[in-house]
């Protein structure tokens, strides 16, 4: 009689994630998993067959992953599990700011705060300085694109979005802003292409999906 194979052990990370869901203590969660898992191991677990483990790994990477986790987080945006996708959507935006040195990271945080406060001219100035010193910083290009969009500088915003996507092909926000900018310029074909690109990167973008449906009809009716 054949002996039954033991079931594979579920990584401890899954239990730590469950505790975090109960406690809602991010610092405690980070402290616990950081003692046992490196970011590289978390990236490996993000491809685990069990969705709870993938959820835990993507959530953890959102807290501690740097830009090297971008590819893993980008793939997780397409996961079969909706919770994994949502965790990736939230976490990847933090990963995008964890590139470069500490002063550059503080600067991009300042630019994001300026955009959130509607201080678009100031955001453009500071993002431009950051781009001059770190042209490979995709989020700097994206934040300047956002500011330029709000100031109705649509062509300039599109150029910045192209740069952001050239550096970071997972940047669905840049693709979305590009689509909105083309829409303002009444270029429905280019807008549709940009929105479709954003949706391929992140299928959770329901507002973008609505635009794709509407623009598809508009373009096809011509």
Image (spheres, grey):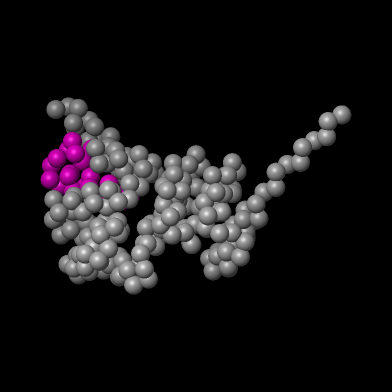
Is residue 182 located in the magenta-colored stretch of the structure?
yes
Q: Residue 145, image x and y in percent?
A: 22, 56
Q: Residue 62 versus residue 205: which sits nearer the camera?
A: 62
Q: Is residue 100 left or right of residue 186?
A: right
The residue at 73%/41% (across/down) is 7
Q: Is residue 221 left or right of residue 85?
A: left
Q: Is residue 209 left or right of residue 44?
A: left
Q: Residue 134 versus residue 210: which sits nearer the camera?
A: 134
The residue at 42%/48% (across/down) is 71
The residue at 46%/48% (across/down) is 72
Query: Magenta region: which residues?
Result: 171-192
Is residue 158 located in the magenta-colored stretch of the structure?
no
Q: Is residue 222 above or below residue 128?
A: above
Residue 31 visible at all: yes
Q: Residue 130, image x and y in percent?
A: 25, 66
Q: Residue 212, image x and y in percent?
A: 27, 37
The prevailing secondary structure element of the residues shown in magenta is helix
Residue placed farthest to the right in the image? 1
To which quarter of the image does residue 16 belong?
A: bottom right
Q: Is residue 116 above or below residue 154?
A: below
The residue at 27%/41% (across/down) is 195
């Amino acid at each position: 009689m054949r002996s039954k194979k033991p079931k594979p052990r579920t990584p401890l990370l899954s239990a730590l994630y469950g505790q975090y869901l109960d406690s809602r203590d991010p610092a405690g969660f980070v402290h616990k998993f950081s003692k046992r898992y490196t970011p590289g191991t978390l990236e490996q677990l993000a491809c685990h067959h069990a969705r709870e483990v993938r959820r835990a790994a993507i959530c953890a990477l959102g807290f501690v992953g740097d830009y090297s986790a971008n590819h893993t987080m980008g793939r997780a945006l397409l996961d079969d599990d909706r919770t994994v996708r949502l965790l990736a959507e939230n976490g990847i935006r933090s990963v995008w700011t964890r590139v470069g040195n500490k002063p550059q990271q503080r600067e991009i945080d300042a630019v994001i705060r300026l955009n959130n406060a509607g201080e678009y001219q100031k955001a453009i100035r500071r993002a431009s300085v950051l781009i001059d010193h770190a042209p490979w910083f995709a989020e700097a290009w994206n934040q300047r694109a956002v500011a330029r969009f709000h100031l109705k500088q649509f062509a300039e915003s599109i150029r910045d979005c192209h740069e952001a996507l050239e550096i970071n092909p997972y940047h669905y926000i840049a693709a979305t802003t590009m689509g909105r900018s083309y829409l303002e310029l009444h270029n429905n074909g280019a807008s549709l292409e940009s929105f479709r690109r954003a949706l391929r990167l992140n299928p959770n973008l329901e507002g973008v999906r609505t635009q794709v449906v509407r623009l598809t009809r508009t373009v096809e009716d011509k």
